[in-house]
Structures are given as C-alpha cells and as structure tokens.
Image: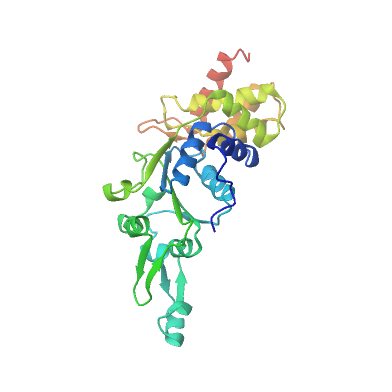
Amino acid sequence: MEGVVEQDKTIDEMIDEIQEQFNIVGRTFELKKCLAAKLANRHILLEGDVGVGKTTLAHALASYFSQDLERVDGDERYSSSKLVGHFDPPMVIEKGYDWDSFVTGPLTKAMQQGAILFLNELNRMPEGTQNVLLAAMDEGIIMIPKLGEVKAVDGFFIISAMNPAELVATTPLSEALRDRFVWIRLQYQPEEEEQNIVRVRTGIKDEKIILMAVKIVRATRDWPDLRRGSSIRGAIDLAAIIRFLEVNDIESWIDSSIMALATKIELEDGVESLVEDVIKDIVTTTLQDMDFF
C-alpha cells in the first residue's frame, strides 16, 4: 500500500526526515532525485560502484513510503520463472493449474501487493530475465500462462541497482529496458562525509582512527596496482578492528588493513605482487603522508 507520507511536504523536508530516520550521511542531491522520481512514479536505475549505498537508498525509500520491499539479487542463473513465478508440479497434479499450485515470484508479488521491487545487480541477470520487466514497467501488466493477466495495484514501483557496466560478469542492459528507467549515478562521497559515516557506523570517538582509516581506503581507489579500490565498508571495518589493537603502531595498521581490505579490492591485470604487499605499500605511503612517523 502507498505510504503515509504527507504530500504537502517539500522534498527538502522529506530529505531531512529520511537522513534522520535512517542514519543516512549526506546523499542530499541523490535523495532529491530519488524522491522526485518516486513522486513522479518513474522507475529508478541506480548505478555506482560496490558499497556506495545503492541498497541503503532503496530500503530507505521503501520504509519512508511505508511500502513492502521485494528484493532480488541478480546473477547469471536468475531465470524469468524465478522472477515471475512457476507452477509446483505435485500441486498441479493435485489441484491443476491455478493459483494454489503457483509459486509466486517477487515481480508478481510486488505487483499484487503494490510493493517496491528492488532488483540488486540487475545487469548480472540474463537478458531474457531482464526483458520480462518491460510490460510490467510499461502497462503495469504481465501475462502468466494458464492463469492470465496480473495487473499491478497502486504503489508498484521498481528500483534497480547495478554496478558499472565495465565490471566482470555484467550484462549490458538492452536499450528498451534502459529507456524505461530514470538514471541516477552514485559516486564515492566526499572525504568529510565518509568520516561521518565511519563515526555513525562504528561509534568510535577517536578522530585519529577515523581520519587514518578513511585516508587509507580513499588511497586504494587511485592506487595504480588496483583495478578496484575499497568502498567505505573498508574504512568501517578497519576502524572497528584497529581500535582493539595498538593505534600508534604501524604494524597494527598494516595487519588491520590487510584484514579489512583484502576482500574489497581487486588487483590490476598483470600485477604479480601479493595483495598483502600492495596493501602494506598503500598503508605505509598513506601514513607517511599523514606524518604518522
């Protein structure tokens, strides 16, 4: 059901409420775009690197508008029958082809309930699965063989999130599908906002930990040996770990950084160094620039 948000509120008032209610640091410009699209009933495509907050925005919008959220995590094996639904063979034998024998998929469920369908990593789904969305987005209708037409009730809305198209294992969205979305890019946030995120997520008061953790993570994004640097999650994990170790010891920072970042970065093609050695170089260089020594 469509939420209880008062329509006489300004978008700026709504942004303030969302930031406060869901502990969202910054993202004012992106929230304004999301709210404008939602109020205009235009399906949203969020594009950005891993960890920039695409999922957080989707959940915040659904909660703010008091709508259920049906989440789908896309991969190359996610079929159209999973998205729409399928018949359960034993139940078909018992009851025939009716709704009692149909296992409802998230698209159908969101349409029937007037919920938000959140498609995470849409561009990892096969093109055939992606194309099932076209009629639902155009007319708010899908056809299920042997059951007939399903028409979306008020409130049905799609938010899709995708990583940049150049990443491995992604499938370019068809022109027809892209044409039915409005597009919002999420980039890494300014350094001060990332520091605030670490404060909020960890509760750490030590400014030295916060500043250093964020500096190290931001350095990974421009490091020549890396194809992909770390999101803010790396700084959150690093800060959370180092506070229990020796904050003034360089080896503690190196060990904590390896633990926090090794799973969040990708080496560039042709780099023969171990990921541990690359992280050690990043930490040493960054702390040297910050006069740690």
Q: Is residue 287 shown above or below 279?
A: above
Q: Which one is in front, 92 or 261?
A: 92
Q: Specify the color scheme.
A: rainbow
Judge whether residue 120 can be spotted in this image.
Answer: no
Q: Residue furthest bottom?
A: 94
Q: Which one is in front, 253 or 4?
A: 4
Q: Which one is in front, 217 or 35?
A: 35
Q: Position of residue 183 (x, y in %)?
A: 38, 40
Judge whether residue 290 can be spotted in this image.
Answer: yes
**The N terminus, quarter of image:** bottom right
Q: Is residue 168 shown above or below 126?
A: above
Q: Position of residue 262 (x, y in %)?
A: 52, 36
**Is residue 20 rendered to the left or right of residue 262?**
right
Residue at 44% across, 30% down: 273
Quarter occupied by residue 80:
bottom left
Q: Is residue 260 shown above or below 218?
A: below
Q: Position of residue 23 (x, y in %)?
A: 63, 38
Quarter occupied by residue 245:
top right
Q: Residue furthest front?
A: 8
Residue at 41% across, 62% down: 83
Residue at 46% across, 37% down: 33
**The C terminus, quarter of image:** top right
**Is residue 78 rendered to the left or right of residue 113?**
left
Q: Position of residue 98 (x, y in %)?
A: 43, 80
Quarter occupied by residue 211:
top right
Q: Tell how many labels.
A: 0
Q: Is residue 284 shown above or below 279?
A: above
Q: Which one is in front, 62 or 256?
A: 62
